[in-house]
Amino acid sequence: MRRLLPVLIVLLAAARPAAALDRAAVDRLAFGESDEKIAAIGALVAEGDPRAAALLQALGAGELETAGKRVLLVRGDEAVDAVTGEKVSPLPAAREDVIANNRVRAAIATAVAALRLVSPDRATRLAAARELAGGADPAVLSLVRKALEKEADPVIRPLLEQIAASIELKSGAKETRLVAIRTLAQSDNPATRAMLLTLTARNKDGSFVEPDADLRLEAERSLRAVEDRLAWGEWLGLAFAGVSLGSILLLAALGLAITYGLMGVINMAHGELIMVGAYTTYVVQNLFRAHAPGAFDWYLAAAVPAAFIVSALVGMALERGVIRWLYGRPLETLLATWGISLILMQAVRTIFGAQNVQVENPAFMSGGIQALANVVLPWNRIVIIFFAAAVLAAMWLTLTRTRLGLFVRGVTQNRAMAACVGVPTTRVDMLAFGLGSGIAGLAGCALSQIGNVGPDLGQGYIVDSFMVVVFGGVGQLAGTVYAALVLGFANKLLESWSGAVIAKIAVLVFIIVFIQRRPQGLFALRGRAVEA
Amino acid sequence: MAPVATTLARLYGPKGWLALGAAAAMLFVVFPVLSLAVPQSSAFHLSQYWVTLAGKIMCYAIVALAMDLVWGYTGILSLGHGLFFALGGYAMGMYLMRQIGREGQYQADLPDFMVFLDWKELPWQWWNSDQFWWCALLAVAVPGLLAFVFGYLAFRSRVKGVYFSIITQALTFAAMLLFFRNATGFGGNNGFTDFKRILGFAIATPETRMVLFATTGAALIATLLVGRFLVTSRLGRVLTAIRDAEARVAFCGYNTLHYKLFVWTLSAVLCGIAGALYVPQVGIINPSEMSPANSIEIAIWVAVGGRGTLVGPILGAGLVNGGKSFFTQAFPEYWLYVLGLLFILVTLFLPRGVVGLLTRRRGAG
């Protein structure tokens, strides 16, 4: 609403030369009881005067005051007469606030939305139409009809028709209601479904709420059409949620696919490397806010490489300091890296505090695309899907097209032979571990955009990311990708049936059973080794 | 008499039995006297805090012993032993909840949390839970059965090493999520607490506490002897052989599945017993006991004390948990640093734990 205020003020200025508002209605709005106020709101709306919107908005904001018989719009030290729009100065000393209770406020909200239906700005009209499509007050019907006369936009027009229909549905004449029900069949709004459901419902004694059988029949037909359309939206939403979760799992697991999948290091501190990336993003964000507020929207451009580098450095330090002494002893590696994860977590608590920190989305990542009436695709999730794809592509190129990638693959396949032909295996180990850790940092940077950033961030992903790598098959990049997507989809699909916790448990149990059936994962490397 | 005597001689030499006897005397005579007979004003009086702490650590020591049997002797690192411990605890907790009777906040026959959730009758999981013998049986049978089924499936498909560790971690994680739900019927994230009685005796009196303490001590000594009996037997040697070269043991004609499954299930049962003893002393059980972090901590008790020895885990459980109690009171923010460093330093520099350090000293001196 606040964003609309400037628009309304402009409208107000433009409309000033026009005829004054209906004085009687304004007076009833200012001096009447709640019922009179609501009636007055209806009367003001029916005229479709944009200045009425400013007036109602002012009433909602507590800026409408009375001085004797006059009704004033007071903002700061300035006041204008609500009826004529003339400036009033000096400000009268004896003024009283016009008070709006909740019922009046609700009426104001729909009225303001309805008035926006006749705005010259298309986006404003569309937003208003969407807002009213959920259910509108009968008072706005005449205004909606007026808006329909002028409206030519192919998106807004059907919405307006549905709004009009949803109001007419409650009116008396059978013919009007039949037409209204037919119109509502075109709706893709969940509120319409609820509205039609009440028409087909039965009372407690088994009789129908709606006595007219024709109306019921028509309502059922429309209901089916609406439900089909809504089902599409639900599936689309589900598919998107699945891909989104899959991309997050993939990001969290990609780094592990290198350190565990290729190098065979059980890194229980992987989640904490993700956390380090997220906190790096937080620090970069704060630096931008403090030193370059103008470029705040671009802080991610600096945060992405920073998260990579910081996590990679931490990872390389771990490899040099601890992990390299434990190659070939996976269980010991597991315990030592767990210790590292505890220390990293506590270090973050010491530095940044135990509470979650705030990481803000840049402006272009907030909001979303309204795909259907019941589906919004948030921008931050869309960006992360593409980010995950980009990280995957970069990682694949690094492993297959660069000298480092060649060395990494060589060392993991046959360390002794690689060393014999002159590959500096210890350096390759360090760099490969750094690469995996850096990718974990990238995951943290992405996660900071959609969830809480706190010291426990990594703990939530460690089990998940191991599951993805193990499920996909150790040492298989493609397997990791498929596993992440499959698990993401499965999780969201089950979630829609059984709730989040049961879904999570079901997926874990499924993986436990799956690994018992196929210990090598989805995509097994063929080999003859007895002890792989 | 002769077979018994040889068995006893096999378990420990005279010095060992003497040490064990001293420990038993300490647990069953010195502690009770200091706690109950010595007046509170005396400097030698043992307060409730220490009795509870010592009892708690002995429960952990049983878990550590159980862990050592599978990890130290058989080479299977479980990251899910906290689950078996918690299941035992929950079974005992159910009985203790029923013992509250109508003394809860709502003065109802049902446990408070069920009244709060507006349940009218006990769910099926609570069948017969007012009987002590039934809950004691559950405390052993549920972890045992779960471990048996899980172990059978895992060992049969030759899931081993790190894979096994990770799926046990997933198992306890899944169970934790399950127990966090109110609908599971075990009190959701609050779990069970506010116990009043056990077997009709008020649970908070020093006498009941001391009985629980002594029972835990007896269970610990029994676990130690069972473990000793096991590892000195032929079966114990096969287990150690599986740890060192499983494929070779299999090629020699042993069915490693049976051996692993036996020790794995036994270990889970021991954990269940420890959990059942733990809950009445500590007075609370909730799903966070099943968190992966708790289970992995068990491994560090064993590693600190010394894998592949039986004294080691007891020592390790005592040292780490004693240290934890000290640090979380004196320097709460440093405990995780200490624990983390323990994980790293022990794996890097003390692969045989404290016991290894001591024996090396003795060997050198």
Image: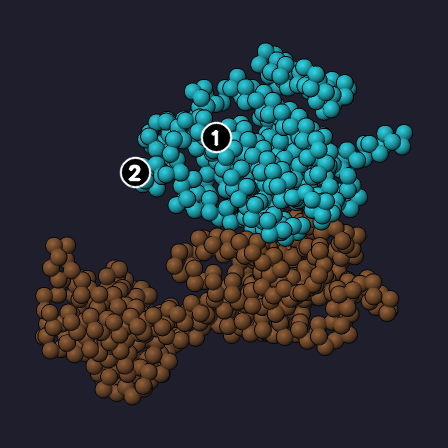
Is residue A465 visible to us here?
Answer: no
Q: Position of residue A130 (x, y in %)?
A: 32, 74
Look at mark 1 in the image and give the residue it sits on: B137
Looking at the image, residue B235 lies above or below residue B17? below
- The residue nearer to you, when weighing B146 against B218, is B146
Quick check: do tags 2 and 1 share a chain?
A: yes
Chain shown in brown: A
Q: Residue furthest front?
A: B253
Q: Residues within 10 Å of mark 2 (few under 14, many from 20)?
A: few
Callout 2 touching callout 1 (CB < 8 Å)? no
Dividing the picture into quadrants, the one containing residue B316 is top right
Quarter of the picture containing the C terminus of chain A is bottom right
Identify the subunit bearing mark 1: B
Q: Residue furthest right?
A: B365
Q: How many marks?
A: 2
Q: Chain B appears in which tint? A: cyan
Q: What separation in Å lies between label 2 and label 1 (alpha carbons)?
A: 26 Å
Q: Nearer the viewer, mark 2 or mark 1?
A: 1
Residue at x 15% of width, y 69% of height: A216
Looking at the image, residue A128 lies above or below residue B194? below
Is residue A308 visible to us here?
Answer: yes
Element assignment for label 1: helix
Identity, as a three-letter code, of the amino acid under mark 1? Leu
B74 sits to left or right of B55: right
Identify the subunit bearing mark 2: B
Look at mark 2 in the image and give the residue it sits on: B120
Identity, as a three-letter code, of the amino acid under mark 2? Lys
